[in-house]
Image: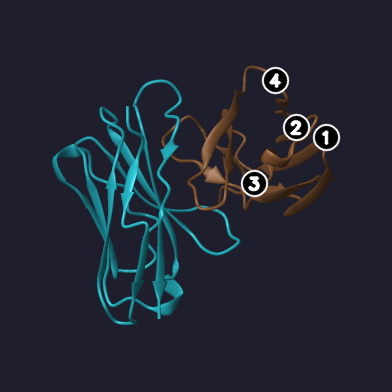
Chain colours: A brown, B cyan
Amino acid sequence: GENVEQHPSTLSVQEGDSAVIKCTYSDSASNYFPWYKQELGKGPQLIIDIRSNVGEKKDQRIAVTLNKTAKHFSLHITETQPEDSAVYFCAASTGTYKYIFGTGTRLKVLA
Amino acid sequence: GAGVSQSPSNKVTEKGKDVELRCDPISGHTALYWYRQSLGQGLEFLIYFQGNSAPDKSGLPSDRFSAERTGGSVSTLTIQRTQQEDSAVYLCASSSRQGMNIQYFGAGTRLSVL
């Protein structure tokens, strides 16, 4: 069935360094890829998304890249700050209501 | 406007009891989702409501789980005869039919079954 694999499960970086989280999806019909950030005790919040008709999207320190041929997409956070510490989830959708989520990456930014 | 609201935020119950979890979606959102998030795990899809259409119940793990959505707005997730493995955070999300159906999540209900 449809599957999204996410790596790594945990990631520790020094403040100011970059962080990269990678996801691979199985359904070639997927055309929408959101990324969510979940802080402790809160629900996931959308931070950036990308559609299949573009290869990269940036929003300040956050960027997402998509490789449709390889069926993988990545989240890049530059100049990390302590407030970036959270759990990050990727997801894939074929444009219908259903999202398939990755298992999450716990990012720790060390001051 | 207000976001997705869930209540209670925490629920502790004894094994075998029934529980009801409530979700109040963003006003005007026609789609509503329930997910389960077990400790250290991803988001497990449970059920989806869209307007007056029949819900997609394909993610409900057993017949002890049910959900309803009254008047196309508030939804209640009911777990009967709770088991310890039901302990998790239950998240609700809502979305508009427009665009790519971006899902907006509530803060969740943390359920602990003793």
Q: Residues within 10 Å of mark 4 (few under 14, many from 20)?
A: few
Q: Going from the N terminus, do you reach mark 4 or mark 3 first? A: 4
> Chain ID for label 1?
A
Residue under disc 4 on the same chain as residue under disc 2: yes
Spot occupied by residue A14 in the image (x, y as percentages of width and height): 85, 43
Residue under disc 3 on the same chain as residue under disc 2: yes
- The amino acid type found where label 4 is placed reads Gln
Front position in the image: A62 or B50:
A62
Spot occupied by residue A77 in the image (x, y as percentages of width and height): 75, 32
For this orientation, the residue located farthest to the left is B71
Secondary element at image label 4: loop
Q: Residues within 10 Å of mark 1 (few under 14, many from 20)?
A: some
- The amino acid type found where label 2 is placed reads Ile
* Distance between mark 3 and mark 2 Cα atoms: 12 Å
Q: Going from the N terminus, do you reach mark 4 or mark 2 first? A: 4
Residue annotated with mark 4: A60
In contact (CB < 8 Å): disc 1 and disc 4: no
Residue annotated with mark 2: A77
Residue under disc 1 on the same chain as residue under disc 3: yes
* Distance between mark 1 and mark 2 Cα atoms: 6 Å
Report which quarter residue A98 is drawn in: top left
Q: Is residue B89 left or right of residue B68?
A: right
